[in-house]
Amino acid sequence: MIFSSSRVRIARAAFFALVACATLSGCISAKMYVDPGLPKVSRTDMPVLPETHPVQVLFEFQTKGNANARATSAIQPRVVAVAAESGLFSKISTSADQSDAGILKIVINNMPLTDNVAAKGFGTGLTLGLAGSLVKDGYVCTASYSRNGKTTDVLVDHAIYTTIGNHSAPEGLTPMDPQSAVHLAMDQITWNVLKQLAEKKAF
């Protein structure tokens, strides 16, 4: 029997709606794990500058290269908080309120790194979580700091793993709830951005 593409899409949508309901009811569980590859950075790793300057923080979160306004709004406060905690700036702002302020621009692009994500999700749902699946999401951060006509660029890569259903955890990693995992990954990215910029004498 041959199905039209529209019928296939409808059937697929109905199936994933069923899987979502099962997930919410606890039949299929999802756990997230932050990749350990990115160095752990904190304020103690930041240089003590002889003089600090105000900074305007420009942040955007993207999904597959497209602006994601909802995620940007949710994550921006964390990026600003890390910049403030770093001790690298005399004042933090998200608007241009001082003429001598530097500009810290951070763009984080979320790109799936697992092949055939839909097919894996379909298989997990079909077995009500017994088969299980592992998905890896990549986060590519491009950042720059500009002041007095000088711009310094850095690049930071990170990742989060998600297990769905009956799938073993990535070796050595601790499961986290989705919000905590995303917050930790975004904080780690921001800290590493600032450290790399500092190492390049951007400030």
Image (tube, rainbow, N blue to C red):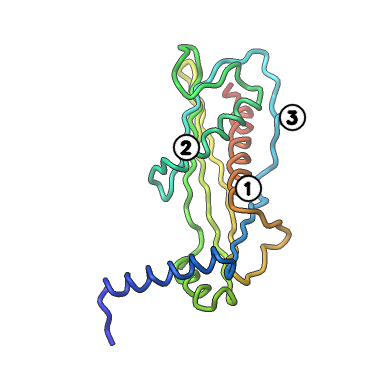
Q: CA distance from mark 1 to mark 3?
A: 23 Å
Image quadrant where one finds the C terminus: top right
Residue denoted by label 1: 180
**Where, by quadrant of the figure, is residue 80 drawn?**
top right
Amino acid found under the numbered disc labelled 1: Ser
Quadrant location of residue 3?
bottom left
Viewer-proximal residue among 30 and 134: 30
Q: Nearer the viewer, residue 82 or 101?
A: 82
Residues 129 and 151: in front is 129
Tell me which numbered mark, 1 or 3, is placed earlier along the sequence: 3
Residue 44, disc: 3
Nearest to viewer (mark 1 / mark 3): 1
Q: Secondary structure at mark 1?
A: helix
Q: Is residue 158 above or below residue 119?
A: above
- Can you give x and y, in whole percent of width and height, for residue 39 in the image? 68, 43
Q: Quadrant of residue 13?
A: bottom left
User: Which residue is tagged 2?
Assistant: 73
State the CA–CA distance, disc 3 to disc 2: 28 Å
Under tag 2, what secondary structure? Answer: helix
Q: Position of residue 144 (x, y in %)?
A: 50, 30
Q: Position of residue 70 (x, y in %)?
A: 44, 42
Q: What is the spatial separation of the Cα atoms under label 2 and label 1, in whole angstroms?
A: 16 Å
Mark 1 nearby-residue class (10 Å; few <14, some 14–19, many ≥20): some
Q: Earlier in the sequence, mark 3 or mark 2?
A: 3
Q: Which residue type carries mark 2?
A: Ser
**Type of the residue with mark 3:** Thr
**Element type at marker 3?**
helix
Rendered residue at 62%/31% (across/down): 82
